[in-house]
Image (cartoon, rainbow, N blue to C red):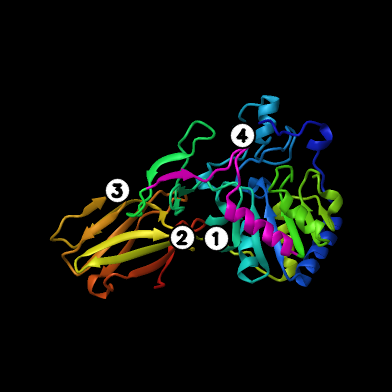
Amino acid sequence: MDTAHKTVNEKKEYFDSPELLEAKVTQLADMIKQSNHFVCFTGAGISTSAGIADFRSGVNTVLKTGPGLWEKMAQKVGNQPKKHKVIMSRAVPTKSHMALVKLNQEGILKYLISQNIDGLHRRSGFNPNSLSELHGNTNLEKCLKCGKSYMRDYRVRKALDVHDHLTGRICDNQKCGGELVDTIVNFGENLPKKDMEQGFFNSKQADLHLVLGSSLRVTPAADMPLATAQNGNKLVVVNLQKTPLDSLCALRIYALIDDVMVLLMKKLGLEIPEFILQRTIVIKKTNQNTINVFSEDKDGCPYDIFKQIVLDQGKKQPFEIQVKAPYIFNITNPQFAIKLGFFEHYKEGPFRLDLNLQNLPLGQKTKYLIQFSPKLQKWISCEKIQ
């Protein structure tokens, strides 16, 4: 479906002067301080500084990612290898992604609605319970039968046909066994019910709705910021190109998303946290000598993050290597270690976790939070959290 901008005016990018931008962001900071239910809505523009191209930027865009996908299709523009682009699974959440994490952690940002499928909001550490991913997540699949969700550290979509969503995997719930489908929403398909309901609910509750990097041309997603404005509350749009809702804005900002969010956080007196890759490692002793190793996301959703796991029970026994879930090991030495191997999207090397079988409660989960710094290129912490 061709949804590229058609006219020169639609493609034109606007920039506020430094002085005007300063004044506008000061005004936005004041709005946030006075707000009781602050909601944010993000489009592809928030991820361009992470190296992920948007959809509607023109051929002459200032963005390093180059023309948007629809623009390239419409203008028959080929790939531009000199442009700043990355593989989606290796993209690092931007300063704006991390600013939203901080605002949510501080209780300032009540809810986040996103049109993006890149998964950067969840990867950034944003609370999944305060997030609607309206168009799906490239790393998330769900069971057709029971609705159980599964996060993967890789792209789950395999189908070539646009409306075929089967991934070829099966639900691991023994009472179910239903087929799994990717969560990507294509044109003509319905938005996920829960995400849509929560998006509209929070938009109608919002006294301030901040739109970051969306053209606001795809409905019903764009109807959410519209609902806030129609209720007589404040709508703020940050986008280089003009949008259909500009006339309803209490404040309209023309600037790069990161420029706005970095300045905004300074005015709010908040530091933008560094992106740290967080992994929750779960060990469950299923009987006296057997353990199951797996991972979960922040909301308890199963998370497939391991490329392999190596069991080390000391010099007298050979290593046992497993490359596919479920990772179930028979333990003969109370003192043992598991060496966790990952997909290394951020060059995160293996992590060794030393364990004592006697300290693992039978039938219960023992959880460890391990953290990797892409900046420092090393694992920086390991904490037992349950």
Q: Nearer the viewer, mark 2 or mark 4?
A: 2
Query: Which residue is labeled 3 in the image?
Result: 323
Q: Position of residue 31 (x, y in %)?
A: 80, 67
- Would you say the residues marked 1 and 3 are in contact, meaning their CB atoms lie under 8 Å apart? no
- Label 2 CA crowd tier, 10 Å (few <14, some 14–19, many 20+): many
The numbered mark, 3 or 4, whose residue comes first in the sequence reads: 4
Q: Which of the image's four quarters has the C terminus? A: bottom left
The numbered mark, 2 or 4, whose residue comes first in the sequence reads: 4
Q: Please, what is the three-letter code of the amino acid marked with disc 1?
A: Pro
- Label 3 CA crowd tier, 10 Å (few <14, some 14–19, many 20+): few
Q: Quadrant of residue 109?
A: bottom right
Q: Which residue is at the front of the view, 152 or 204?
A: 204
Q: Please, what is the three-letter code of the amino acid marked with disc 3?
A: Val
Query: Which residue is labeled 2 in the image?
Result: 297
| Residue drawn at point x = 36 percent, y = 64 percent | 282
Q: Please, what is the three-letter code of the amino acid marked with disc 4?
A: Lys
The numbered mark, 4 or 1, whose residue comes first in the sequence reads: 4
Q: Tell me the element at label 3.
A: loop
Q: Position of residue 175 (x, y in %)?
A: 34, 55
Query: Which residue is labeled 4 in the image?
Result: 82
- Residue 127 appears in the rendering: no
> Range of the magenta residues?
178-206
Query: Which residue is labeled 1 in the image?
Result: 128
- Would you say the residues marked 2 and 1 are in contact, meaning their CB atoms lie under 8 Å apart? yes
| Residue drawn at point x = 65 percent, y = 34 percent | 69
Q: Tell me the element at label 1.
A: helix
